[in-house]
Image: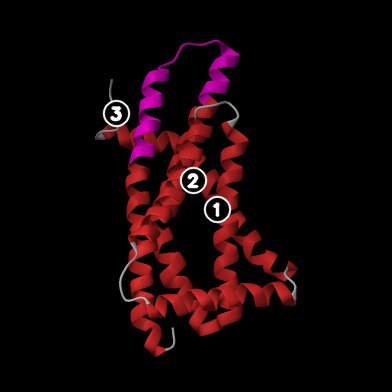
Amino acid sequence: MPGLGGGRWADWWARHQGYGILVLATFVFGGLAGALALDALGAGDRLALLALVKEFLNLVAERSTADLNVLGVALLTNLKVLGLIYVMGVSVAGLPLILLAIFFRGFVLGFAVGFLLGTLHRVGLGLALVAVVLPNLVLVPAWLATGAGGLAFSWQLLAGHRRGASWRLSEAFLQYTVVALVGAVEVGVGSALQALMAPTVLHWLAPWGL
């Protein structure tokens, strides 16, 4: 049973470009919606969130070593997101649910970056780049690729059921699973950046006002 080696990967990507564009557009739209949602926050909510961010910065500034427990929590949380997308992709209900999950991830990231920039300004820019943008440069592609594969496989299930046609479902499922497994490796790297590298960099930069 062939996987995603050599030319098969190029063929897989060529057949899934449309789904990738749809997933990326949904993510971007979610990020914009998250940034715009800041306007709905009252003054009290902004102050409460700002207090939590400053408390986090104080903890990071005082801690000189990485906490492996934080890595475990980050890894488990990020793998849950990837696993949820994967599971939704193997059902006909995955079409709207995957897009909803991708939209929500974009919303959360857009809200976080927008809040940091809008309340902490220069410090917020540095914090957003180190603590949010850096790990998500690895995490987001994993979620988007798995989401695109899930949309395609879910559509194959729906279309195949309607037509009653026979097609190589086992090969398609294997390819989708390989994409998710590669995504899981990326999630591991992104979680390490999120839980270990980002707090360490923030600790180093704390004396300079970050």
Rate crowding at label 3 as few (under 14), some (14 to 19) or many (20 or more) other CA atoms within 10 Å. Answer: some
Q: Which residue is mark 1?
A: 105
Q: Which residue is mark 2?
A: 81
First in sequence: mark 3 vs mark 2? 3
What residue is at 44 percent from the left and 71 percent from the top?
A: 129
Q: Quadrant of the C terminus?
A: bottom left
Rate crowding at label 2 as few (under 14), some (14 to 19) or many (20 or more) other CA atoms within 10 Å. Answer: some
Q: Position of residue 1 (x, y in %)?
A: 28, 20
On screen, residue 125 above or below 185: below
User: Is-magenta flag for residue 162?
Assistant: yes
Under mark 3, the amino acid is Gly
Under mark 1, the amino acid is Arg
First in sequence: mark 1 vs mark 2? 2
Q: Main secondary structure of the magenta part?
A: helix
Tags 1 and 2 touching, CB below 8 Å: yes
Q: Position of residue 68 (x, y in %)?
A: 33, 60
On screen, residue 89 above or below 59: above
Looking at the picture, tell me which residue is in the foreground, 50 or 13.
50
Q: Nearer the viewer, mark 3 or mark 1?
A: 1
First in sequence: mark 3 vs mark 1? 3
Label 1 to label 2: alpha-carbon separation: 9 Å
Q: Which region shows up in magenta?
A: 156-181
What residue is at 31 percent from the left and 36 percent from the top?
A: 9
What residue is at 41 percent from the left and 75 percent from the top?
A: 60
Looking at the picture, tell me which residue is in the foreground, 59 or 194.
59
